[in-house]
Amino acid sequence: MTADRKITRVINVNGVAIGGGNPVVIQSMTNTKAHDVEGTLNQIEKLEAAGCAAVRLAVPDMEAVSAFKAVRAKTKIPLVADIHFDYRLAIAAIEAGAGKIRINPGNIGGQERVKAVIDAARSAGVPIRIGVNSGSLEKHLIEKYGSPNADALAESALSWIAYFEKENFGDIIVSIKASEVLTTIKACRRLSESTDVPQHIGITESGTVRSGSIRSAVGLGALLAEGIGDTLRVSLAGDPVQEIFVAKEILKSLDLMEGPAVIACPTCGRTQIDVASLAEKVEQFVAPLKKPLKVAVMGCIVNGPGEAREADIGIAGGKGEGLIFVKGNPLKKVPEDKLLEELKKQIFEILN
């Protein structure tokens, strides 16, 4: 069972409430060219269909601001403008309709330029995400701590929170990210103990779909299980749609999101059907469903129904056939080549 959620202040991003015990918001970031409006829109459509609730776009130059504005005009999902180095891009992105601005104050050029972004965001009613990253930590903190460790990251985040609040701007979200899982966990814990600002959590540069999914599940799972994290991104090298699937599985595993879940046995010498292939197809089929549903794909009739008795519906394989069972009770035997079709039919009956 997960720990109680830490209650943070509520930040509204184009109608999406972040913090305050609201459901954890899944985010991603497009990896299309910053000037490619149609390609970016196509990717946003796929992300939204997969379950993404907010999308971040890189805005590296003024031409990208124009593209951002064009994208904003053709989608309703909240868009976050990702800004580095040039504060004028942040101001221009606010004017272009950004739902939120993400800046790393440590690389934006000093407090006066950060204040200019704050003033523009305040006027437009746009929240700001303060990004603190191990790769762009302030030099004086590197000198003080010797490395971008958890203490350095937490101090940077808290000092910027203090500055924003001194400027009477509390419409903020903070993210502390490092590629080291334990560093991220420790820094986010310290931040959680010291402020009610909502946290966007993630493991930066986590890796490929395989390794990055594991590192993200460990890091984000540990934080979420402690009640820390109001919004998240699973950062993977590859198709960002994969990030959404991984994020949803992390949240569902901690009972922080409703939706279908597929369990499958690891197979053994008794297995006489292709469990792995069947489980993949079942997972693809149930992924778009919104209702909670537990589906089991088990390799044999010996232990299958018993081990998966808590599943709503499942398959237990036999020789050239499988047993369809509901809540551990047998329903009917079906030839192997008809198992997927019959399972889909029974799922529709359960849900409807």
Image (cartoon, rainbow, N blue to C red):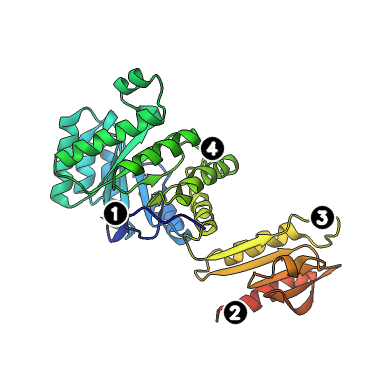
Amino acid type for the residue under numbered disc 3: Cys
What is the number of the mark on residue 72? 1
Three-letter code, disc 2: Ile
Question: In the image, what residue occupies the spot 35% across and 45% down?
Answer: 57
As measured in the structure, the alpha-carbon distance from the residue carrying label 1 to the one carrying label 2 is 39 Å
Q: Earlier in the sequence, mark 1 or mark 4?
A: 1
Quarter of the image holding residue 190? top left
> Dot 3: within a 10 Å radius of its alpha carbon, few (fewer than 14), some, or many (20 or more) residues?
few
Measuring from the top left, give residue 81's x and y in whole percent: 30, 45
Looking at the rendered structure, the secondary structure element under dot 2 is: helix
Query: Of callouts 2 and 3, which one flags the residue occurring earlier in the amino acid sequence?
Result: 3
Instruction: Report the disc number at residue 268.
Output: 3
Disc 4 vs disc 3: which is toward the camera? Answer: 3
Q: Earlier in the sequence, mark 1 or mark 2?
A: 1
User: Mark 4 vs mark 3: which is more N-terminal?
Assistant: 4
Vertical comparison of 45 with 132: above or below: below
Q: Secondary structure at mark 4?
A: loop
The answer for how far apart the CA atoms under marks 4 and 2 are is 39 Å
Judge by depth and name the residue closer to the eye, 329 or 202: 329
Residue at 36 percent across and 28 percent down: it is 152
For label 1, count other residues whose C-alpha is less than 10 Å away and answer few (under 14), some (14-19) or many (20+). some
- Residue at the spot of label 2: 350
Q: What number is the disc on residue 207?
A: 4
The residues tagged by marks 1 and 4 sit, at their Cα atoms, a distance apart of 29 Å
Mark 4 or 2, nearer chain start: 4
What amino acid is labelled 1 in the image? Arg
